[in-house]
Image (spheres, rainbow, N blue to C red):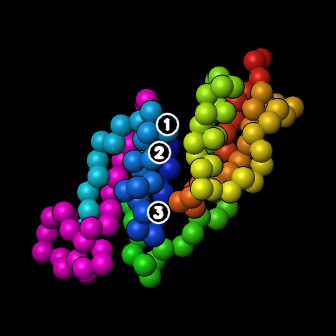
Amino acid sequence: MKLNPYLNFPGTCKEAMMTYAGVLGGEVVAMMTYGDMPGENEVPDDLADKIAHARIAIGDDLLMASDAAPDRFKPMQGVSVTLNISEPAEADRVFAALIEGGTEIMPLTETFWALKFGVLIDRFGTQWMINCMKPE
């Protein structure tokens, strides 16, 4: 079994996933709009160019996402996407890149378990925890 996060956005999915792929060194392996979906279902004009499904491969992990219809979107609450990063300098780089235009919840700093740990909400509304563990 493998777990992977699936994020929802209010129309900013494409920009968010392209940003995440760049920051995290991933590859966009799928990006389909509602207008590209097969079948005979009518797609409202305001959804036709929005993302129905996107997938980024980051090593052996996947990050998936879509744009929710305006009447179905709810901002993220009570969950964080956690990145476990082995090098402190890489933790600094990723934190700095993700926080651009976002909000710092906890600064990236040393804790009793980590060389670096911090929490932020990026400009797309995704909450991230950056964790760089201390050597055991």
Q: Amino acid at mark 3?
A: Asn
Q: Position of residue 92 (x, y in %)?
A: 66, 33
Q: CA distance from mark 2 to mark 3?
A: 14 Å
Residue at x 68% of width, y 51% of height: 120
Identify the residue shown where x is 48% and y is 57%: 7
Res 24 label: 1
Identify the secondary structure beneath mark 3. strand
What amino acid type should be assigned to the residue bearing mark 1? Leu
Residue 54 percent across, percent down from the top left:
34, 52
Instruction: Identify the mark at residue 61; answer none if there is no mark.
Output: none
Q: Depth check: 93 or 112 in front?
A: 93
Q: Does 12 sit above or below residue 25?
A: below
Name the residue at 43% across, 63% down.
12
Can you say which quadrant of the picture contains the C terminus? top right
Helix, strand or loop at label 2? It is helix
Q: Sequence-wise, which precedes: disc 1 or disc 3? A: 3
Answer left or right for 91 relative to 19.
right
Q: Is residue 37 magenta?
A: yes
Q: Nearer the viewer, mark 1 or mark 3?
A: 1
Q: Is residue 127 visible?
A: no
Q: Give the foreground label among 2 and 3.
A: 2
Q: Are marks 1 and 2 in contact (CB under 8 Å)?
A: yes
Horizontally, residue 112 falls left or right of residue 3, namely right
The 10 Å Cα crowd at callout 3, few under 14, some 14 to 19, many 20 or more, is: many
Amino acid bearing label 2:
Tyr
Is residue 118 located in the magenta-colored stretch of the structure?
no
Where is mark 2, residue-wise? Answer: 20
Q: Is residue 42 above or below residue 93?
A: below
Numbered badge on residue 8: 3
Q: Residue furthest right?
A: 112
